[in-house]
């Protein structure tokens, strides 16, 4: 079910005494319309059936609107228009059909010249994001090598019989094979104790570039950045996915699968800024997955997700 945007979510303080440049997100976000000029578009994907199928704790279906509430009061530093296009809501158990609907919505936004930022929802949303980009590029002059960068503690390469939050990148790999296209996949923040030897073997078979969580420390960033640069250079279009469980549970408790270690927020922010700078217009869309407000503390994880949205959408990127 597709639900039109609820602008009542966009509320917050107004600093009128500070002048015209003291705007906040709730004063700038516009409802999306088909005739909207190209800009950046938020799309909520309200699903956690995939998390349930993957034996995780549910609650992420309520994530998109909770992130919007956290975004509403943020100071505005974006250039150009930002739209809210509402939510796609899974109302039954048919995740496979839901993913196809998401794919068409993503492709339509890309066809209209927008940069979609999807808010989840379980990480099953990654298949609809990636297949939407493939659908958009197929048969166009821009068609080429699609690269996927996944910031995540997990590979999500399970070969289950049904789609779940553990299968989206395996599904995308299968699509690439069917289209006789390369599958270019890079994972940042993988936790070895959270992924079986079978998943590491599957990742190796797919020639996945893997950077484990323990490698993402300040004194080891140069080789990581070099690997990112080589990967980005080889790709024609990029899709960036952020699973919030890549961060430590201490700062991101509101996720489907809290991380025992994770990677530091400042490291993740640095890498995201580096990816944005290196990728430029190759970066076509992004999503933020696995925010679970049921298990959040003081909206801690929602505020973190909102900060990452700010970083992804600001035109001016500072490498820290």
Image (spheres, helix red, strand yellow):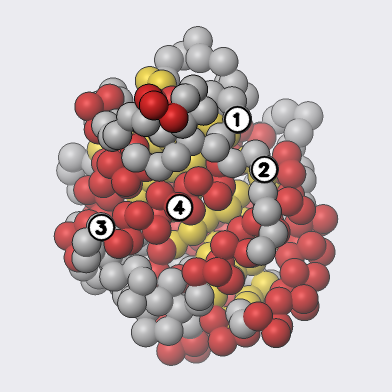
Task: Classify mark 2: residues with Cα within 10 Å, few (<14), some (14-19) or many (20+).
Answer: some
Task: Classify mark 1: residues with Cα within 10 Å, few (<14), some (14-19) or many (20+).
Answer: few
Q: Which mark is first along the chain, 1 or 3?
A: 1
Disc 1 + disc 2, Cβ < 8 Å: yes
Q: Which mark is first along the chain, 3 or 2?
A: 3
The residue at 73%/65% (across/down) is 228
Q: Which residue is mark 1?
A: 79
Task: Classify mark 4: residues with Cα within 10 Å, few (<14), some (14-19) or many (20+).
Answer: some
Which image quarter: residue 320?
Answer: bottom right
Q: Separation of disc 2 and disc 3 at Cα?
A: 27 Å
Residue 202 visible to an observer of this rendering: no
Q: Separation of disc 1 and disc 2 at Cα?
A: 9 Å
List x then y, in percent, for residue 277.
73, 51
Q: Which mark is first along the chain, 2 or 1?
A: 1
Asked which secondary structure carries label 3, the reply is: loop
Q: Which residue is mark 3?
A: 299
Q: Separation of disc 3 and disc 1 at Cα?
A: 27 Å
Q: Could you say which disc has been placed on residue 316 in the image?
A: 2
Does 141 sit left or right of 30 as displayed? right
Classify 32 as above or below 171.
above
Q: Which residue is mark 4?
A: 307
Q: Separation of disc 4 and disc 2 at Cα?
A: 14 Å
List x then y, in percent, for residue 45.
34, 42
Query: Which of the two residues, 217 or 211, is positioned nearer the viewer here?
Result: 217
Which image quarter: residue 105?
Answer: top left
Q: Separation of disc 4 and disc 1 at Cα?
A: 16 Å
């Amino acid at each position: 079910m597709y639900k039109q945007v609820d602008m009542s979510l966009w509320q917050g303080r107004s600093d009128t005494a500070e002048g015209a440049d003291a705007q906040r997100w709730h004063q700038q976000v516009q409802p999306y319309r088909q005739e909207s000029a190209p800009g950046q578009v938020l799309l909520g994907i309200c699903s956690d059936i995939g998390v349930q199928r993957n034996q995780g704790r549910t609650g992420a279906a309520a994530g998109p609107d909770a992130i919007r509430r956290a975004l509403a009061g943020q100071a505005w530093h974006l250039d150009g228009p930002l739209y809210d296009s509402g939510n796609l809501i899974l109302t039954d158990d048919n995740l496979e059909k839901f993913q196809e609907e998401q794919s068409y919505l993503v492709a339509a936004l890309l066809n209209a010249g927008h940069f979609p930022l999807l808010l989840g929802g379980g990480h099953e949303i990654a298949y609809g994001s990636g297949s939407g980009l493939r659908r958009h590029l197929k048969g166009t002059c821009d068609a080429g090598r699609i690269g996927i960068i996944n910031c995540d503690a997990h590979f999500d390469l399970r070969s289950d019989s049904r789609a779940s939050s553990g299968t989206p990148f395996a599904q995308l790999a299968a699509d690439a094979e069917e289209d006789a296209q390369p599958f270019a996949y890079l994972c940042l923040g993988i936790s070895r104790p959270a992924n079986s030897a079978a998943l590491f073997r599957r990742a190796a078979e797919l020639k996945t570039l893997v950077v484990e969580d323990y490698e993402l420390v300040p004194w080891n960033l140069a080789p990581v950045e070099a690997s990112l640069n080589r990967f980005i250079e080889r790709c024609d279009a990029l899709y960036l996915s952020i699973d919030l469980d890549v961060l430590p549970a201490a700062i991101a408790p509101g996720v489907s699968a809290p991380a025992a270690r994770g990677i530091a927020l400042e490291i993740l922010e640095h890498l995201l800024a580096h990816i944005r700078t290196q990728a430029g217009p190759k970066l076509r869309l992004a999503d933020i997955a696995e925010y679970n407000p049921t298990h959040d503390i003081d909206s801690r994880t929602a505020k973190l997700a909102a900060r990452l949205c700010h970083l992804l959408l600001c035109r001016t990127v500072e490498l820290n």
